[in-house]
Amino acid sequence: MVVDDEKNILTFVMKAPESHGMNVVSYTDPNLALQHFADVSKSFDVFVSDLRMAELTGFQMARKVKELHPRIKFANPSHYPNSYG
């Protein structure tokens, strides 16, 4: 599952796993993502979430996801504009 509140970033992040034949479920709304994840958490191997979203932070998402599926792999990629320059 991939969650990012910016649709263009979400689309970009999904390309790599899809190009390797993986099925990717994506959401721009973190609350809807958590609802879906709660229903079928064991069907996911990896959860990718942006760190900086308006409704929930990536850290909040990680805590909730780990409560439902403690062994899932979790990634929090984020982009910080002008952070290098």
Image (cartoon, helix red, strand yellow):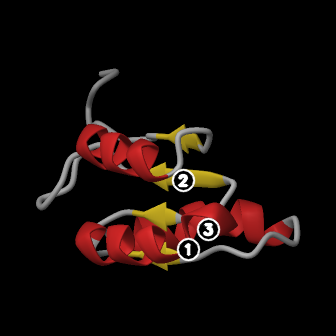
Q: Which mark is residue 55?
A: none
Residue at the (39%, 45%) spot, across then down: 67
At label 1, the amino acid type is Val
**On screen, 79 above or below 28?**
above
Q: Residue furthest right?
A: 21
Do residues under tags 1 and 3 come within 8 Å of each other at their CB atoms? no
Quadrant (top left/top right/bottom left/bottom right) for the C terminus:
top left
Secondary structure category for the residue under label 1: helix
Which circle, 1 or 2, is nearer the viewer? 1
At label 3, the amino acid type is Met
Secondary structure category for the residue under label 3: helix
Residue at image mark 2:
47
Among numbered discs 3 and 2, the one appearing first in the sequence: 3
Among numbered discs 1 and 2, the one appearing first in the sequence: 1
Q: Position of residue 4 (x, y in %)?
A: 36, 63
Residue at the (75%, 62%) spot, across then down: 17
Residue at image mark 1:
40
Residue at the (57%, 61%) spot, across then down: 13
Q: Residue furthest top?
A: 84
**On screen, 34 above or below 59?**
below
Q: Quadrant of residue 18?
A: bottom right
Q: CA distance from mark 3 to mark 2?
A: 12 Å
Q: CA distance from mark 1 to mark 3?
A: 19 Å
**On screen, 5 above or below 84?**
below
At label 2, the amino acid type is Phe
Q: Residue furthest left?
A: 54
Quadrant (top left/top right/bottom left/bottom right) for the N terminus:
bottom right
Residue at image mark 3:
14
Q: CA distance from mark 1 to mark 2?
A: 13 Å
Q: Position of residue 26 (x, y in %)?
A: 50, 75
